[in-house]
Image (cartoon, rainbow, N blue to C red):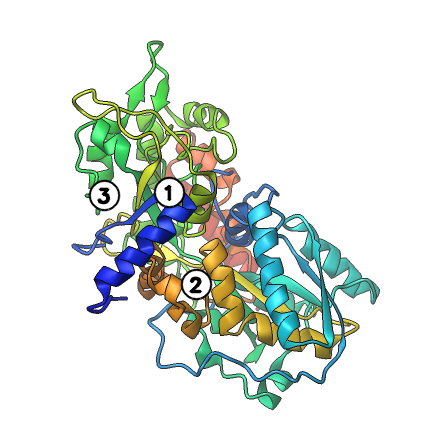
Amino acid sequence: MKRSSVVTFLLFVLALFIAACGANPTAAPANTSAPTSAATSAATRAATTAAANTTAPSGATTAPTTSAAATTAPAATSGNFKLNTSVSGNVEFWHHWGSQLRRTSIRRVIGICQQKLPNVKVTDVFKPFGDGWTANAAAVAAGSGMPDVIVSDRPTLPQAAADKVYESLAARVQKDGVDGSAFFPFTWQQTLYNNESYGMPFETDVRVLYWDKNLFREVGLDPEKPPVKWDDLFAMADKLDKKNPDGSYARIAFLPVGVGNIGPDMWMYTDGATWVQNGKVTVDQAKAVEVYEFIKKWSDRYGGWDNVQKFISTLGAPPNDAFMSGKVAMIADIQGYVSQIRFYDPRIKTKDAQGKDLNDRLDYGVSDLPYNVSKGTWSGGFSLSVPRGAKNPDAAWEFIKCATSVDGEASWSRDTNAIAPNIQANKDPSLVADPVYQSFVSALQFSKVEPFIKEYPNWGEKIFSNTFLDPVLKGQKPIKDALTEAQKAIDEQIAKKK
């Protein structure tokens, strides 16, 4: 999104905002010249997104189940949905946002909605990531104990709808004139099963690259020029990698999997390809071989996958994680990671190429993912849904409309840096004035999502899990052979369901 002639004023506002946050973020020239587990998968899409949203850990589980490509949104409705203020009732709201930052942020959204809906009382209940969905599914099966509203994983929402975990919102959407065009198209499409919505998009994400400008300065790289292509990453790594006297790595430049929030599947999009072609899951393809060769090259660079895993084991949680500790110079992560950097305001002692001490405050930039063929990235996110059998569905619906309207989503995005699916919410002055946030929104223009494969929603478990990745990266199985085996297993599973 481009700024107008008021750029000077906006940058002034941004400077005040950054000073208040105690950080030094800079959006990359956005690659305009072109653009904790080893494998991340689809419920893990949610899991890794949640790593920035909750105190609960995340891990690899399933694979992409999204239903449309992200596109630049058309002109939308106002983004504000009419509320029925006469509705009353108690709403129990389950979410996984347990960190100090996000618990406070979601309660601010609740506060906004309780002002607009004076007869609706919302009680928020924290459930560690994943536990809430498991508990809700069990409660729905038992017929009692479910919440009235739950944060649902949007990429896997069609499967949950098929399993009758959530109520269809179709009748309510039609009755209240809720227009899906209020949201970025792919976020709305992800909520649909049999052309009926089972949730309202609440937040979305996108994978980007973070780089440490001070570490660039230390080794003589231009701190304002992030890597644009895959080859740039390797060239920069030749300078950024740093060993201890015993030969172990004190610092590495980059890892395409294992740190941050990205998996093999997402790198496919930066190689100009997709995993599902003409409705068919196609993992046994030349581009897939190329992607895994790219990943293995990094593993081999650092002494093999076992050594990489040992290095990863030395990393802690924020602010002692890979990037904020200065042990990894560049990482791929979701946009929400910015809120963690701003919250912790980490300090790393570094020197420039001449040996002069640099400001120890982390100076970072954000840019598009480096690519091989074309710009690419992946987006997941969450929605708000009504569990089947909820006691107060009418009050729940009013709260959901409020939370996903402009005021609710803008508040959440200001606090957490999650991207608002509600298009108009992104025009909030504070968000417009933040070039880092706007670079995230711009990345949605080339973000990808895969179609939902109803015969095998979790097909990615055959190719993005550690079970697949470990023998490939350890050189125990040729990449092509492993992909051929995975394709056969996927085809067989899909054939059983047709």
Q: Amino acid at mark 1?
A: Ala
Given residues 484 and 366, the one toward you in this image is 366
Q: Of helix, strand and loop, which one carries label 2? A: loop
Q: Of helix, strand and loop, which one carries label 1? A: loop
For the C terminus, give its image quadrant. Answer: bottom right
Sequence-first disc among 1 and 2: 1
As drawn, the label of residue 443 is: none
Q: Residue at x 29, y 25 (%)?
A: 350
**Front: mark 3 or 2:** 3
Give the distance between the C-alpha atoms of the residues marked 3 and 2, in whole angstroms.
28 Å
Residue named by callout 1:
23
Instruction: Tell me if I can see residue 263 in this picture.
Output: no
Mark 3 and mark 1 residues within 8 Å of each other at the beta carbon: no
Q: Residue at x 44, y 55 (%)?
A: 417
Question: In the rendered view, would you say 389 is above or below 78?
Answer: above
Give the distance between the C-alpha atoms of the residues marked 1 and 2, in whole angstroms.
35 Å
Query: Label 2: few (<14), some or many (≥20) within 10 Å?
Result: many
**Front: mark 1 or 2:** 1
Q: Of helix, strand and loop, which one carries label 3? A: loop
Question: In the rendered view, would you say 40 is above or below 493?
Answer: above
Residue named by callout 2:
450
Q: Residue at x 20, y 40 (%)?
A: 232
Q: Amino acid at mark 2?
A: Glu
**Front: mark 3 or 1:** 1
Sequence-first disc among 3 and 1: 1
Q: Residue at x 17, y 29 (%)?
A: 220
